[in-house]
Amino acid sequence: MRRYTITVAGTAHEIEVEETSATRFQVRVDGQDVDVELTSHQDAGDSPVVPQIDPRPESEPARAPRVPRQVRTRATGSPSPAVSGGADLAYSMTAPMPGVIASVDARPGDQVPKGRTVLVLEAMKMKNELHASRSGVIAEVLVAEGDQVKYGQPLLRFEKA
């Protein structure tokens, strides 16, 4: 219960307020209990907002929500490397996130097994080891230590078998 002092027509009154629901309160004014119901939320910025949810009738089938046309047709960010990589995707490694190359642990001509760490990418102050996605020979390393890379940027290529 909260205690307040209110002044009405120059007279101070001590009140205690207890919220019983979002719109109902029990108020004690100068020792006398009064039930109060809040019917208008105008000018009550701190009052709780209670959403009104109307259940769907069981006879009405479920539908997907409508998406505004401008949202459906708007292009989203950069495409996934899997979409833009084409046939060479299987023979290259791309950046999984933007960041800075912390170290390059493979050189052109190196034979690497699948799973070996070939690069370390620092993103958001965390070092992420990037592992070879396949076994093979490194054909070309496209980045150097300290390079800033973007999401989906090619980092190295494997020789095609």
Image (cartoon, helix red, strand yellow):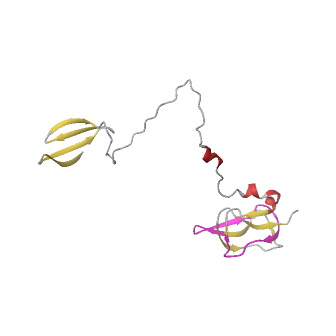
**Residue 113, relative to residue 43: is it above or below?**
below
**Residue 65: image x %, image y %?**
58, 38
Residue 31, picture quadrant: top left
**Residue 109, relative to residue 29: is it above or below?**
below
Q: Point out the stretch of residues depicted in magenta.
A: 121-148
The residue depicted at 77 percent of the width and 59 percent of the height is 85
Residue 63, picture quadrant: top right
Placement of the C terminus among the 4 image quadrants: bottom right
Give the farthest residue toward the left: 11
- Left or right? Give the position of 89 relative to 123: right
Magenta stretch: includes residue 90: no
Give the farthest residue toward the front: 70
- Left or right? Give the position of 161 relative to 86: right
**Residue 130: image x %, image y %?**
70, 65
- Left or right? Give the position of 24 relative to 7: right
Q: Which residue is more in the foreground, 93 or 49? A: 49
The residue depicted at 21 percent of the width and 40 percent of the height is 27
Give the farthest residue toward the top: 59
- Left or right? Give the position of 45 relative to 79: left
Magenta stretch: includes residue 135: yes
Residue 105, picture quadrant: bottom right
Q: Which residue is more in the foreground, 138 or 18? A: 18
The residue depicted at 42 percent of the width and 39 percent of the height is 51
The residue depicted at 33 percent of the width and 45 percent of the height is 47
**Residue 158: image x %, image y %?**
82, 66
